[in-house]
Image (cartoon, rainbow, N blue to C red):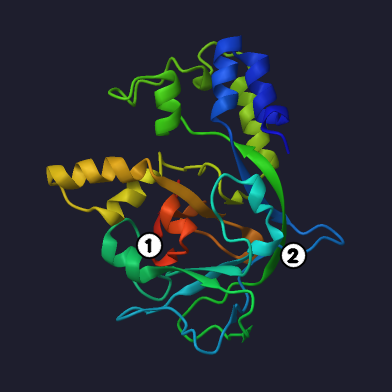
Amino acid sequence: MQISESPLAEAGRRFFSSKDAETWIGLLRPAYHLRALAAGESVVAYLGGEPLLPKDVEWPVWEGHGPLCFVAALDCSQVPTKELDIPLPTSGQLLFFYFDGLGDSSVVYSDPASVIHGTRVIHIPADAEVTERAVPEGATAYPRLLLGGELIATAPDNENAALIAAYGNADDPVAYCDYPTTDPNGTGFWDALTTFRRDHSPHHRVGGYALPVQGAVEPEGAQVLYPGTAQQAVAARKQVASQLVLLAQIDSDARSAMGWGDAGRLYWMIRRDDLAAGRFEKATFTWQCE
């Protein structure tokens, strides 16, 4: 897939000035969209079911609350990692767990304690001996859904720091009414963007930009790493938010009985250097819903 030939790039060329279109296309990033498995296609990922785990890897538990729910598994060898712009592992599996709170009133959000204990990313090496692990009592057992995938272009939302830097003023990040991406002149760009997103729903993806439900997700992920209101923490959050990349986004999906709040999405993020080094315990997280 060539970014410059994607429907998002074409929308920019069609509805923006030549200068704004060039800027827009330069902002687009590749992602791997996880979608329904096509006939004869290799399985790239799956939602729910019983994950494949080595015997020496314990099922993740949030002490005092219960076991985490298994959300998704990604076969890294089936992802065209060279086509992405994040240093994703080229082999093994990535497993994603989340405490959905259905049997407990606790909610995983953006405070450090709940994210550290209520979410987990585990990388299983390709040569590990694995067997299916039954979902423990107390954890939601979601139906398994097999997924294939395809490369797509993704775009920053209007609160994304990259888009603000390109079209707006970093010191006035909410003054985006004049960005071409808000379609102030009713050119049809917003309709084209909405159609593209509808055609790629549910929005399960690896890499690229997150598709927020309630504003940029990176500051929420940074809140986990540097909580508090002290000036030093605020400055650190701003810096780390610019360093976070989307590792995986898992949407609500009726096919696997997954519903995160009201049509919500789960977002796992990580710093590039931590991803390159395989430090998945450093991943951060947030979720949003309507």
Residue positioned 44% across, 64% down in the render: 280
The answer, for residue 8, to whether it is visible in the render is: yes
Residue positioned 59% across, 72% down in the render: 142
Q: Quick one: label 1, few (<14), some, or many (20+) residues within 10 Å?
A: some
Q: Residue 282 carries which label?
A: 1
Of badges 1 and 2, nearer the viewer stands: 1
Whole-percent x, y for residue 195 in the image: 67, 32
Q: Which amino acid does label 2 sit on?
A: Val
The answer, for residue 271, to whether it is visible in the render is: no
User: Mark 1 or mark 2: which comes first in sequence?
Assistant: 2
Residue at mark 2:
43
Does residue 112 sit above or below 92 in this rendering?
above
Q: Which amino acid does label 1 sit on?
A: Lys
Q: On the rendered structure, is 229 left or right of 127?
A: left
Image quadrant where one finds the N terminus: top right
Does residue 189 sit above or below 231 in this rendering?
above
Q: Check whether the beta carbons of the residues at disc 1 and disc 2 lie within 8 A of each other.
A: no
Does residue 142 sit above or below 206 in this rendering?
below
Does residue 18 sit above or below 219 in this rendering?
above
Quarter of image, res 48? bottom right
Whole-percent x, y for residue 177 in the image: 42, 18
SS at circle 1: helix
In this view, the residue in front, 157 or 195, is 157
SS at circle 2: loop
Q: Residue furthest right?
A: 40
Residue positioned 27% across, 66% down in the render: 113
Q: On the rendered structure, is 5 left or right of 251?
A: right
Q: Residue 52 carries which label?
A: none
Quarter of image, res 78? bottom right
Q: Which residue lies furthest to the bottom in this view?
A: 55
